[in-house]
Image (tube, rainbow, N blue to C red):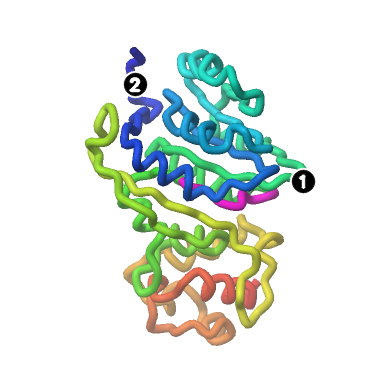
Amino acid sequence: MFTPIKTLGQNFLKDTQAIKKMVLSLGVREGEIVIEIGPGLGAVTTEVMENFGTWDISVKAVEIDLRFVDKLRTMFPLYNNIKIVEANIIDWLPTFDPGDKNFRIIGSLPYYITSPIIHNTIKMKKRPESCVILIQKEVARRISTVAPDSTYMSSFVQSFFDVEYLATVDKKEFTPSPEVDAGILKLTKRKTASLPVHIDIDQIDINKYEKFLHKAYSNPRKMLNKMFFEDELKRADLNAQYRAQNYNADDWLQAFGILN
């Protein structure tokens, strides 16, 4: 029996239907790489291998807790296409190079590092085709919302991924039970942005774009004429009387393209 380590945000999902939904929603295809974040006791990993273990895929399960690493390495003797990686996902993701292969990400993310993991994913040289992540419900809702209730996170994430809120998972379906419910979120890589101003989202300067969005959302209750100069608003076709939440990701991408 493993005692969860609170500082690592360890809450183990036991809802088999939620696990199946996550794995089947990932959209795995032959020849791809699957990255699992924080496999823990291996519930999601087992479902991945049962569904795709005989396929021409490669699975990399990245776990920071050595106790689980040792256990996981004994769990899948019938498969030679899975590797258990002992690493901190925050450090490991920026180093991952899929070469010419497509890859996908799945995992139940520790709530306290959800934002850094998502930011690291967006900043990868090559982005995943899809991600299915289990995160705090409130954060999942915040990422999936649209105008007139947009948030910084929804605008940032939806600039690079189509976002779909798949399901809510009751906090009682975890051991130990966290204080809040969770939400399953699917992110699907955007190929191009359909905008009047051409922007290659694969070549965009993400650090500059982050600063631009932070400026827009720096005081969500104030109108945009408090955040931008009048000539900037006119050039970018932004309504001075609107707040940042009144615009979607594509609006911000277009404004960024014009002003930068």
In percent of width and height, residue 47 lies at 47, 34
Which circle marks residue 176 in the picture? none
Residue named by callout 1: 100
In percent of width and height, residue 56 lies at 68, 37
Residue 38 appears anywhere in the view: no
In percent of width and height, residue 236 lies at 56, 81
Label whose residue precedes the other's in the sequence (1 or 2): 2
Q: Amino acid at mark 1?
A: Asp
- Tell me: residue 21, above or below residue 156: above
Residue drawn at the location 38% of the way across and 48% of the way down: 184
Q: Main secondary structure of the magenta part?
A: loop
What span is in magenta? Answer: 125-132
Is residue 129 on the magenta stretch? yes
- Tell me: residue 25, above or below residue 68: below
Q: Quadrant of residue 22?
A: top left
Element class at badge 1 = loop
Q: Within 10 Å of the Cα at label 2, are there few (<14), some (14-19), or many (20+) other Cα atoms?
A: some
Residue named by callout 2: 4
| Residue nearer the viewer, 192 or 242 | 192
Residue drawn at the location 34% of the way across and 69% of the way down: 149
